[in-house]
Image: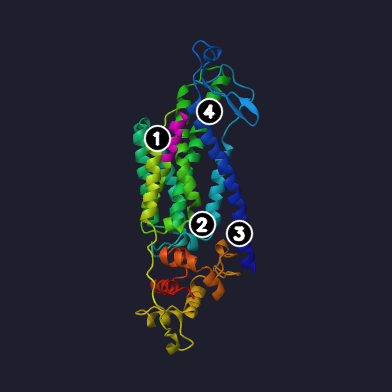
Amino acid sequence: MDALLVSYGVEWLNLLVRWLHLITGIAWIGASFYFVWLDNSIRPPKPGSDLANKGVSGELWAVHGGGFYNPQKYLVAPAELPADLHWFKWEAYATWLSGFAMLFIVYYFNASAMMINKDVADLNTWQAIGVGLGTLVVGWTVYDLLCRSPLGKREGLLGIVMYLFIVAAAYVLTHLLSGRAAYIHVGAMIGTMMVGNVLMVIIPGQRKLVEAMRVGKSPDPIYGKKAKQRSVHNNYFTLPVLFIMISNHYGMTYSHPYNWLILAAIIAAGALIRHFFNLRHAGRVSLGYPIAGVALLLIVAIAIAPKPIQPVAPVAPVAAAAGAAATVGATVAATAAAPVADMAHIQEIIGQRCATCHSAQPTQPGFATAPAGVMLQTPDLIRQHADKIYQQAVQLKAMPLANMTHITDEERALIGAWYAAGAK
């Protein structure tokens, strides 16, 4: 009962922190989208006008919520420091903190189930957690050094190098962690780069601009330029990060043998589509970018599409000859040449390999309720979810998570034969 209450409490903590992460993420990404759109949409004032004389580099008129708005951007800073100045930072900080908490609640608290796949790498719990945390540190360090190097002055080349670095990180992680954990840690690495930009570059630069004005000095425009560069980087990171946030629902991507390459293609598609919108806000319509992005997604969808199964005739069970006390392993060995499409054997396999989590009262540590509400403890429930069982256990091999219940290829073949015979 104590273990159940702990798991149930963690489940609620997961829910609340995930909710917070979603709310703050919307606020942060929404602000990022808005300000990049604003920068691309403002138009310079007429030469010699009052706005031009005040140092305004651009303005925009907009209507929203029944009111008119007239945001103005100064080339460096206004003549006088405003009394009230809003800082956009807590959206970023709260998003990263809640996301980091999610890593602990979902992945590090139950690393053996959520991070480790012995078929990928024989790691222990602390090694897996160390890989995850090390990814965040190494990712930010490499990215920041590249931005500060001479490469940082060549945006196009910097973007290519960073993309290759992220793909390399995805390749390494998918060969150390479970596919699901690898994807999430690529996203966490990119998210750490984004919040690092806010914490280490954008906000400090803004503080120096404000402090210079307070002491009556002319602000150095270099801080604004650096902040703008990192802000634009964050804007291009957003679509890939948003995909990774929801990727845990789509085992067809992270469970594929070439999961790192799939992620690389989807990240590229997201960046291309984002680039189209950034150009469009600046008045340039380049349809080649979204077409290329959609084409990449289509190629991925076709490449990882499940292969149709060939119907097979039901085969008479042979387990009876082994006696009522025969184990699943003995049944599999006896039927290796002729898969058994028998409900009794399927229920035995599901009971040992899947129902430890997928039941009304899970016995697998760390689970208080059945994942996604899918329960498999009775024949009727197994038949009801036959399509999902076949997809996750046979086609994708995404379940059991990290194969923590040690399902064998022979058992997966039995499930496939049962499904092909009509799942009866």
The residue positioned farthest toward the top in the image shown? 48
Residue 169 shows in the view: no
Identify the residue shown where x is 50% and y is 70%. 354
Which residue is label 4 attached to? 206
Q: Amino acid at mark 2?
A: Tyr
> Callout 3, which amino acid?
Glu
N-term mark: 3 or 2: 3
Q: CA–CA distance between discs 3 and 2?
A: 13 Å
Residue 364 falls in image quadrant: bottom right
Place of residue 301 in the rendered image (x, y in percent of width and height, measured from the top left): 40, 53
Q: Are marks 3 and 4 in contact (CB under 8 Å)?
A: no
The residue depicted at 44 percent of the width and 73 percent of the height is: 415
Looking at marks 1 and 2 on the same chain, the residue that comes earlier in the sequence is marked by 2
- Give the residue at mark 3: 11
Q: Earlier in the sequence, mark 4 or mark 1?
A: 1
Query: Which residues fall within the magenta stretch?
Result: 272-282
SS at badge 3: helix
Report if the CB atoms under discs 4 and 2 are less than 8 Å apart: no
Residue that label 1 marks: 147
| Three-letter residue code for mark 4 | Gln
Above or below 385: residue 182: above
The image position of residue 372, as x and y in percent, is: 56, 61
Task: Look at mark 2 in the image and give the residue it sits on.
Answer: 107
Secondary-structure class at tag 4: helix
Where's the N terminus, which quadrant?
bottom right
Rendered position, 352 above or below 193: below
**What label does residue 347 carry, if any?**
none
Of the residues tagged 3 and 4, which is closer to the observer?
A: 3
